[in-house]
Structure formats: structure tokens, C-alpha cells
Amino acid sequence: MSTTRGLAAPAFAHVEVAASDDRALAENVTLSFDADLTIDEARQKQKQKQKQKRQR
């Protein structure tokens, strides 16, 4: 009998969620999800957001 062992690591994902109505107890709300396809894409978006925050 052979045994295979491996290390499990958490997946890193950058997902943004937006709601059509963000009030507490709102009904009939539509959620929108925006997920990055690659880690490079996620890093690029994060850098852009940090730059925008610094400009404010």
C-alpha cells in the first residue's frame, strides 16, 4: 500500500462583492461578484487601489 502526502495551503483570491442595496435587512438584493483570474491581475488591482487611496 502506498501513501501520498502533500502540503495543503490556503488559496489566495481577490474577490469583490457589491450589493444593489446595502442597507441592513434589505430585501430582493442583487449581489455582484468580481474575481481576478490570476495572482498578477490581483496584485495589479491592489496596487491601483493603494495608489488611488494615496491620491485622496
Image (tube, helix red, strand yellow):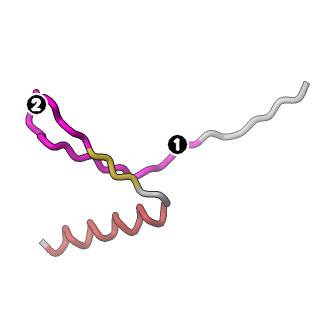
Majority secondary structure of magenta residues = loop
Secondary structure state at the residue bearing disc 2: loop
- Asked if residue 34 lies in the magenta stretch, the reply is no
Amino acid type shown at disc 2: Ala
What amino acid type is highlighted by mark number 1?
Pro
Q: Which of the 4 image quadrants contains residue 31? A: top left
- Image x and y of residue 1, in percent: 91, 24
For label 1, count other residues whose C-alpha is less than 10 Å away and answer few (under 14), some (14-19) or many (20+): few
Q: Whole-percent x and y of residue 17?
A: 27, 46
Residue sitting at 17 percent across and 35 percent down? 29
Closer to the eye: label 2 or 1: 2
Secondary structure of the residue carrying tag 1 is loop
Where 47 falls versus 33 (above or below)?
below
Q: Is residue 15 above or below residue 46?
A: above
Q: Which mark is residue 38?
A: none
Q: Earlier in the sequence, mark 2 or mark 1?
A: 1
Residue named by callout 2: 26
Q: Residue at x 39, y 69 (%)?
A: 44
Q: Nearer the viewer, residue 21 or 6?
A: 21
Q: Which residue is mark 1?
A: 10
Is 11 left, or right, of 54 in this rendering? right
In the displayed structure, 44 sits above or below 19; it is below
Q: Residue at x 12, y 40 (%)?
A: 22
Cβ atoms at labels 2 and 1 below 8 Å apart: no
Query: Between marks 2 and 1, how big is the CA–CA gap?
Result: 33 Å
Query: Residue 28 vs residue 16: left or right?
Result: left
Q: Is residue 30 above or below residue 37?
A: above
Disc 2: CA contacts within 10 A as few (<14), some (14-19) or many (>=20): few
Q: Quadrant of residue 28?
A: top left
Per the rendered image, the range of residues in magenta is: 9-31
Q: Quadrant of the C terminus?
A: bottom left
